[in-house]
Amino acid sequence: MIPPYGTGAASSLLWGSADFLGGVAAKRAPAPLVACFSGVGALALLFVAMPLVPGVATGADLLWGAAAGACGAAGASLMYRSLARGPMSLASPVFSLVGLCVPVLFGLAAGERPSALAWAGVALAGLAIPLLAMTGEGPGHYPRAHVRRTLMVALAAGLVIGWFLVFVARIGGSAGLMPLVVARGAAMGLLGAWYLARGQSLLPSAAARTPAVAAGVLDSAANVAFLVAVHGAPLVLISALVSLAPAATVLAARLTLGERWTMAQAVGLIVALAAGVCISLG
C-alpha cells in the first residue's frame, strides 16, 4: 500500500499537471467554460475509479461534497483564468500558497500537532512558493501591470481553493467516491446554469476541448489521491505537500511555453523538493 505522504505527493504532481492543462485550455476559451467542460473528463475518471475505492457516503458526506463543488466551480474558474493570463510561474505558486493557508489554519484549530521535522517541511514549502513567484523584467517577461492583475486573480483563486481542500478533507474515510461525484456535478451544474442563463453554448472551442478534458481527468485523480491521503496523515502536512503542485506547473510552462525562469525560481524548485522530503520523513 502506498503511504499517505506518497499519495499526497502524487496528488501534488497530478494537480500541478491539471493546472497547466487547464491554463492552456483557458488561453483558447473562457476559463469558467473550461472549468465546466473539464467535468466531462473528471466524472469519467471518478466513475471508472469508484469500484476501486468502495464505500457508503452519509448525508453529511454528500453535503461536504456539494460545498466543495461550489468552491470548485469558482476556484477552478479563477485559477484557470490566472494561469491563462500568465505567467504560470507566478499564478500557480501564489494561489497554491494562499490555498495552503486555509487548511493549515483549520488543521491547527482542530488540534493537529506535527513533528519538528514536519514543521520544517511546512516552513520550506512556505519559502518555496514565493521564490517560485519571483518573475523577472525585460525581454521575455510580462509587464509589471500585467503581473499585478494576474496576482489579484491568483489571490482570489487561492482563497476559494483553500476552502475546497477543507471541505474535501471533511468527507468521511469510508464514504467512497460518491461525494467527489457530487462535488464535480455541483460545480458543473453551477457553471453550466450560468452559461445557459446567458444563452451561451456549453461547448468550448475545439482547440480547448482536449486539454480541458485531460485537465479534468488529472484533477479528479488528484482529488481522489488527496481524499485518500488526508485519512492517513494530518491535514496540515498533506496540504503542505499539495501546495508544492506549482513545481510541476512551472516546469511544464518552462518546457512547453518557453517561460523564462529567474534564479529565485530555480532555487524555489529545489526548496520545494526539500520540503517534500521533510514532510514525508516527519
Image (cartoon, rainbow, N blue to C red):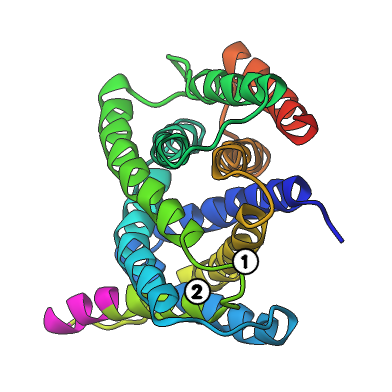
Q: Is residue 263 magenta?
A: no
Q: Residue furthest right?
A: 1
What range is drawn magenta here? Answer: 190-199
Q: Is residue 224 above or below residue 39?
A: above
The kind of residue tagged 1 is: Val
Where residue 248 appears, as percent x and y from the top left, is: 65, 42
- On the rendered image, what quadrant is the N terminus found in? bottom right
Q: Residues within 10 Å of mark 1 (few under 14, many from 20)?
A: many
Q: Are marks 2 and 1 in contact (CB under 8 Å)?
A: yes
- The answer, for residue 260, to whether it is visible in the render is yes
Where residue 133 appears, as percent x and y from the top left, is: 48, 24
The residue at the point 74 percent across, 51 percent down is 4
39 relative to 115 in the view: left or right? left
Q: Within the image, what quadrant is residue 263 found in?
A: top right
Give the secondary structure at mark 2: helix
- On the rendered image, what quadrant is the C terminus found in? top right
Where residue 27 appears, as percent x and y from the top left, is: 41, 55
Q: Within the image, what quadrant is residue 280 found in?
A: top right
The kind of residue tagged 2 is: Leu
- Residue bearing mark 2: 180
- Residue bearing mark 1: 224
The residue at the point 34 percent across, 77 percent down is 186
Along the viewing direction, whichever of 143 and 181 lies nearer the viewer: 181
Q: Residue furthest front?
A: 111
